[in-house]
Image (tube, coloured by chain):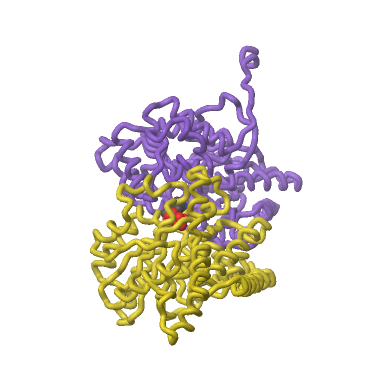
Chain colours: A purple, B yellow
Amino acid sequence: MSAQEQTRPQTIHTTYREAMREAIRDALIRDPRVFLMGEDVGRYGGCFAVSKGLLEEFGPERIRDTPLSESAFVGAGIGAAMGGMRPIVEIMTVNFSLLALDQIVNNAATILHMSGGQFNIPLVIRMTTGAGRQLAAQHSHSLEGWYAHIPGIKVLAPATLEDARGMLWTALEDPDPVLIFEHGSLYNMEGELAADAGAVDIEHAAIRRPGSDLSLITYGGTLGKAMQAALELAAAGIDAEVLDLRTLRPLDNDAIVDSVTRTHRAVIIDEGWRSGSISAEISARIMEGTFYELDAPVQRVCSAEAPMPYPKHLEEAALPQVSVIVETARALVGKRD
Amino acid sequence: MTAITSITAAQAQPQREHALDLFRQMVLIRRFEEKCAELYRAGKIHGFVHLYIGEEAIAAGAMQALAPDDAVVATYREHGHALVRGVPAPAVMAELYGKQEGCSRGRGGSMHLFDAATRFYGGNAIVGGGLPLAVGLALADRLARRPRVTACFFGEGAVAEGEFHECLNLSALWKLPVLFFCENNLYAMGTALGRSESETDLCLKASSYEIPAWPVDGMDVEACEDAARRAAAEVRGGGGPVFLEFRTYRFRAHSMFDPQLYRTKQEIDEWKKRDPILIYDGRLRESGLLDDDRLKRIEDGVAAEVQKAVDFAEAGTWEPVEDLTRFVYSERTRT
Ligand SMILES: Cc1ncc(C[n+]2csc(CCOP(=O)(O)OP(=O)(O)O)c2C)c(N)n1
């Protein structure tokens, strides 16, 4: 222990955006096969400024601005991965990834299996997701749950500085296509990060707050809201556990089942729509895995089933909010006696 | 060319009025959007707001070629198109505020102006997303044997998308009445045309689909109007779509925040010398149609119109939260 104490890592003050940029830098330095491509990643500095400065550092060969051609450059990423490179493809937002859906679903997700195991696709696709900035119906949706429906791809949702810094390298080392969803509201999140922070596992969910009365199960942009709700619940004498899924496909089934088996109650919080969603999948896993341990029906706090409206009051009403999580949790625990 | 200088006396009055109206339209867009920038900073308008400042001549000129029952499809940079098309300025401003008196009930904001009365089909925030809609609107007109046209505005960035190529091909193949109005402002966010296109002559691309295409000085409102009128006449004649490349420049940031690392201040200043309002101001003065007095009256009129729009938006109301899921599906069960 004392040796470890001596080398206890310093922490740095950073943001989610910078942590992500450091992860990309690190990957570019470590592996010459890695390159970044996407719209405005170079000269513009990235539409969310994640890749700012990388063009100057690594040059246009490895920081490649693409035309507005999502299907072509995502597909080219798949091809380049098959050709031995380790591309990081950035799609500005999940909304525009729909123009590349064919390449992701029909090529990236299928080729390994369809070719009888001959061609794997070591590709990473990063994109922003989520609402909260009044960008209306074509720039606000959370469609990562859709992607989690597709066998053959892995779906990550880093919600902390550690994961923003650490998931990319692990994803790049993965032999198969990995999609990373960065919630737009997280980029400015600040905090302390170990100076030597590096790769993290992408297989396990993480308990961000242990608790015994109920499980708040969430990921990505709603982790902060779940943590806040847990704080408010604690003040009301309810001890909530917060489980950050981290990876939406494959889901960490054991972690979900373990948590709910201990707490006997679950609220799932997801910015996606409720019908046919990842929250529905999680709920089903709970029924399948620990039905007899449940003291109450599983509850969900999701987005209203409507395209995202522009005005703030309607956007807030459409999104999962701390107050609704708290109310839902209180009602759920209240059912105990 | 609208030769203001060589008109007969009988034509003089309407032409004079028309020239001044073109000028006034451009000034309205400019002042309206300067106000938008101010209101954005004041926290009245939110989200993404893409200003058209510098490009006003295109909407002001090209829209003249359309009849009231023609259709318009535009992008997220569409305040100017909506205003010239006749969407009332108060309804546009209320939309930017997110008030339910806005032209889209406040639900769309800056990027999603819609207006059935003027057949204004949006405000599309997916690059290239409007082109297929325009093709379909034109197809409906063709099938219903209506002599209408659909004008589709889009930036040169959209030319890289598959939709552009699919839509040009399809509309040419089926000889559909679409006016493809490409606003080439040289940059798609931070990506210069030369960095995104192997062939930067956009008209050549359209020509390869057998679509008549020609470039237009997008800083010259009369040139824009004349080209659009010629194109519309061809399209109405049943020959299929026409493609116009309006060469222009955006004076402001892509959206409200943009450090503009991708272009130099000198370049922006160089283009500002070709400010469409400045150019037309000069031309109108030369031909005796404009003087300081007249300019002041125009500016005062526009200022009053913008103020009226702001007052209307300020007085507007918020859509009740209970209405959040209204219009996810139609309220009538049959059409
Ligand atoms: C399919 C898609 N990809 C990316 C974006 C993000 N984006 C919004 S505007 C824009 C630039 C478009 O440039 P251009 O078509 O030239 O129009 P301009 O903004 O210059 O008017 C980009 C990349 C988007 N809205 N849709």
Please provide percent x and percent y for residue B191. Answer: 43, 47
Q: Is residue A64 left or right of residue B165?
A: right
Q: Nearer the viewer, residue B114 or B266?
A: B266
Q: Is residue B5 visible?
A: yes
Name the residue at 27% across, 57% down: B204
Please provide percent x and percent y for residue B87. Answer: 53, 74
Picture quadrant of ligand 1: bottom left
Name the residue at 68% across, 51% down: A333
Most extreme residue toward the bottom is B10
Q: Is residue B245 left or right of residue B26?
A: left
Name the residue at 65% across, 13% down: A2
Q: Is residue B157 above or below residue A108?
A: below
Q: Quadrant of the C terminus of chain B?
A: bottom left
Q: Quadrant of the N terminus of chain B?
A: bottom left
Q: Is residue B205 left or right of residue B307?
A: left
Q: Nearer the viewer, residue B93 or B59?
A: B59
Please provide percent x and percent y for residue A39. Answer: 43, 46
Q: Nearer the viewer, residue B219 or A139?
A: B219
Please provide percent x and percent y for residue A327. Answer: 68, 55
Q: Is residue B101 visible?
A: no
Q: Is residue A52 above or below residue B276?
A: above
Q: Is residue B198 above or below residue A190?
A: below
